[in-house]
Image: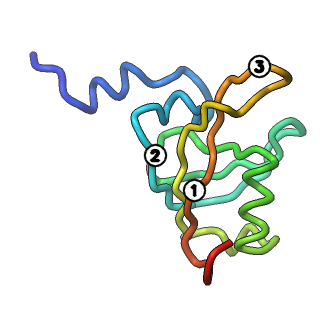
Amino acid sequence: MTLTAQDLQRATQAKSDQLNSCDLLGGAIVAKILDVKSGSSEQPVIIVIDSWPQPWKPSKTSLRVLSACWGNDPAVWIGRYAVLYCEDSVTFGKEAIGGVRTSHLSHITGRK
């Protein structure tokens, strides 16, 4: 049996409950926001997206960007688009571990 691109994608996916930066090593994704839910104290916001099986659990920096561009009502974010990519220089403590960053957003006017 021939291995398909979908088979390979499933085989290389991290075993995790969220979108991770390593999932984006092959390139950025355009993510339509389907739902915004409450999470835990460590990851208070869970964003369900259409382009990945696991949800995006954005960092505080990403949440600040979304709020600055789209406002503070998460219900308004549903149906909007964000381009998500892997940024290798994101640190945790002193170690560069990589992280998910946002590069483009729909529904904004002008440069932000």
Residue located at (86% from left, 35% from top): 42
Q: Could you tell me residue 101's position as x and y percent? A: 63, 46
Residue farthest along the top direction in this orientation? 1
Residue farthest along the left direction in this orientation? 1
- Above or below: residue 12 compared with residue 79: above
- Tags 1 and 2 in contact by the CB under 8 Å rule? yes
Q: Which residue is mark 1?
A: 103
Q: Mark 3: which secondary structure?
A: strand
- Tags 2 and 3 in contact by the CB under 8 Å rule? no
Classed neighbour count for the residue bearing mark 1: other residues with Cα under 10 Å, few (<14), some (14–19), many (≥20) = few
Q: Which of the 4 image quadrants contains residue 64?
A: bottom right
Q: Could you tell me residue 105's position as x and y percent? A: 57, 66
Q: Mark 1: which secondary structure?
A: strand
Q: Disc 2 marks which amino acid? A: Ala
Nearer the observer: mark 2 or 3; the answer is 3
Classed neighbour count for the residue bearing mark 2: other residues with Cα under 10 Å, few (<14), some (14–19), many (≥20) = some
Q: Could you tell me residue 81's position as x and y percent? A: 53, 65
Residue located at (46% from left, 31% from top): 25
Give the Cα distance between marks 2 and 3. 23 Å
Q: Which residue is mark 3?
A: 95
Residue located at (29% from left, 24% from top): 8
Is residue 110 left or right of 66 when viewed as pictured? left
Q: Disc 3 marks which amino acid? A: Glu
In the picture, which quadrant includes the C terminus?
Answer: bottom right
Residue farthest along the right direction in this orientation? 41
Q: Which residue is mark 2?
A: 28
